[in-house]
Image (cartoon, rainbow, N blue to C red):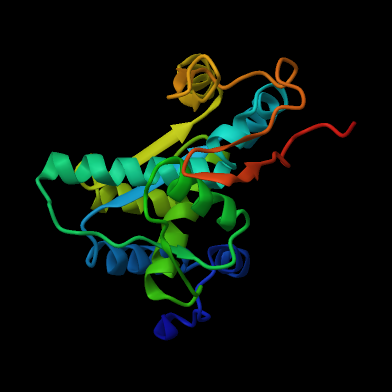
């Protein structure tokens, strides 16, 4: 990275702001992507439409039952990696890492641990090499979503990782959230169903004053904070 005059640690937002008019941008990106893809077996990304999430969260108890957007995309990544391992026949144990200090990290960890029974990822500093590589891939996916077509850096990744066995990118937009909300995805315990019953995520206007938590952590109540209108 230093041979290209790049700052350490690498931040995609800073990099693209500093090099947007650099005539060597294409070559620098090609070098970065080549270094990354030479040292990985697969790449995964998950994107969620924040406006749609916020709209549905106002109507349903989405945050209490499924978590913040960060929790949802982390769960999607975890499932996609599990599916990829099955598809390619890889039984190697994996460790998951996440950049420390990310907004809603605590909620994400609660959801994985208490909702899904999954060990949360280990927080690491931003200067962790794998975090910097993941940052470029994530930003490339983000740029593509904003542009409505593959960005320059994402096209490099697509060229190096062309198949589903090497690259899995999931988009959770309004239609996917609508399907999710219409399905029996959430377990609630009631007097009638003390062992629990699966239901669609309930509406807010039909569940006023009711507290919710995850069965694995009954002492911690779930309170929504995102996209909820003030009373």
Left or right: 9 as drawn, with respect to 158: right
* Residue sitting at the far bottom: 2
* Residue sitting at the far right: 231
Figure disc tally = 0
Measuring from the top left, give residue 164's x and y in whole percent.
23, 39
Measuring from the top left, give residue 81's x and y in whole percent.
28, 46
Q: Is residue 92 above or below residue 189?
A: below
User: Residue at horizontal 29%, vertical 69%?
Assistant: 35
Measuring from the top left, give residue 49's x and y in whole percent.
58, 34
Left or right: 10 as drawn, with respect to 96: right
Measuring from the top left, give residue 47's x and y in whole percent.
49, 40
Nearest the eye: 139 or 220:
220
Q: Quadrant of the N terminus?
A: bottom left
Nearest the eye: 84 or 141:
84
User: Residue at horizontal 74%, vertical 35%?
Assistant: 227
Q: Quadrant of the C terminus?
A: top right
| Residue 144 visible in image | no
Q: Is residue 136 above or below residue 203?
A: below
Q: Is residue 110 above or below residue 177?
A: below
Nearest the eye: 53 or 167:
53
Q: Is residue 66 above or below residue 91?
A: above
| Residue 226 visible in image | yes
User: Residue at horizontal 37%, vertical 69%?
Assistant: 130
Left or right: 33 as drawn, with respect to 160: right
User: Residue at horizontal 55%, vertical 21%?
Assistant: 190
Res 28 → quadrant:
bottom left
């Amino acid at each position: 990275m230093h041979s290209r005059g790049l700052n350490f640690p690498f931040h995609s937002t800073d990099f693209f702001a500093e090099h947007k008019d650099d005539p060597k941008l294409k070559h620098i990106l090609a070098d970065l992507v080549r270094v990354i893809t030479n040292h990985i077996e697969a790449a995964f990304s998950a994107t969620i439409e924040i406006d749609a999430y916020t709209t549905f969260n106002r109507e349903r108890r989405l945050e209490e039952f499924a978590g913040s957007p960060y929790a949802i995309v982390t769960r999607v990544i975890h499932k996609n990696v599990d599916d990829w391992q099955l598809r390619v026949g890889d039984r190697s144990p994996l460790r998951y890492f996440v950049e420390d200090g990310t907004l809603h990290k605590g909620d994400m960890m609660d959801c994985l641990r208490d909702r899904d029974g999954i060990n949360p990822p280990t927080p690491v500093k931003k200067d962790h090499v794998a975090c910097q590589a993941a940052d470029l891939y994530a930003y490339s996916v983000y740029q593509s979503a904003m542009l409505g077509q593959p960005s320059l850096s994402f096209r490099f990744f697509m060229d190096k990782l062309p198949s589903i066995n090497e690259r899995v990118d999931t988009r959770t937009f309004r239609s996917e959230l609508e399907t999710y909300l219409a399905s029996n995805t959430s377990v609630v315990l009631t007097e009638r169903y003390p062992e629990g019953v699966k239901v669609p995520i309930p509406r807010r206007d039909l569940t006023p004053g009711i507290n919710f938590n995850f069965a694995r952590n009954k002492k911690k109540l779930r309170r929504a904070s995102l996209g909820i209108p003030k009373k």
